Amino acid sequence: DTAVSQTPKYLVTQMGNDKSIKCEQNLGHDTMYWYKQDSKKFLKIMFSYNNKELIINETVPNRFSPKSPDKAHLNLHINSLELGDSAVYFCASSQDQGGDTEAFFGQGTRLTVV
Amino acid sequence: GDSVTQMEGPVTLSEEAFLTINCTYTATGYPSLFWYVQYPGEGLQLLLKATKADDKGSNKGFEATYRKETTSFHLEKGSVQVSDSAVYFCALLTGGFKTIFGAGTRLFVKA
């Protein structure tokens, strides 16, 4: 069973379009995240949700809107896509907020904006 | 703020060579420290971790020791294999919800 699954795996779209990436975890974790990985592999956190509540918003343009219908899902909606949004987006989850909690990652969604 | 600095890559080694990837951190509290590995086309997965000073994390022949005095968590392996080729990320987690990652170090191992 896949622990953290995100869809789609690949997404190619034109500038100006609106798109969504879905994420689901079956680990029973309370906290979920979205990370953006650029072409140089640099990994930067975008959002964190704990029990469906937004905890971290790291200066992300408001074109990006996360939505958590329940604590097992954290979807990412992007409006008015721009060329600079091209990257790999990773969803992750963890059990709780501190201590030695490791994060479990999805396989990533490679977004290409043309 | 908290941060992680790791050596720039790529690192290219021959099979059975010794590997060291340096990692240092800055944190206001007492973080837990992690190494994650990303194989081509995949997400990150935990390689090893250490939660307090002088702890040694180990897995699959890789080791790293939490050194509070030097704020370091260097990754080592005595004999690398071609299958170890990947990107390695050092990371820290303090009391909040945010794991902070280093920039990643790409490792190439030649047969």
Image (cartoon, coloured by chain):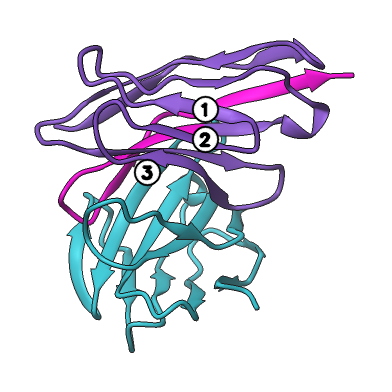
**Contact flag, marks 1 and 2 (Cβ < 8 Å):** yes
Write down the quadrant of residue A108 in the picture. Answer: bottom right
Span highlighted in magenta in the image? B89-111
In space, the residues marked 1 and 3 are separated at their CA atoms by: 25 Å
Q: Residue furthest bottom?
A: A69
Which chain comes out cyan in the rendered image? A
Pointer 1 chain: B
Give the spatial CA distance, label 2 vs label 3. 26 Å
Residue B39 is situated, as x and y percent measured from the top left of the image, at 68, 42
Residue A96 % position (x, y): 26, 66
Question: Is the residue B104 above or below the residue A22 in the image?
Answer: above
- Who is closer to the viewer here, B87 or A80? B87
Count of labels shown? 3
**For the point 62% across and 74% down, which residue is it?**
A2
Residue pointed to by mark 2 = B58
Please state which amino acid type lies under the numbered disc 1. Glu
Location of mark 1 (residue)? B63
Vertical side of A99 occupied by A79: above or below: below
Which quarter of the image is occupied by the N terminus of chain B? top left
Q: Residue at x 55, y 20 (%)?
A: B76
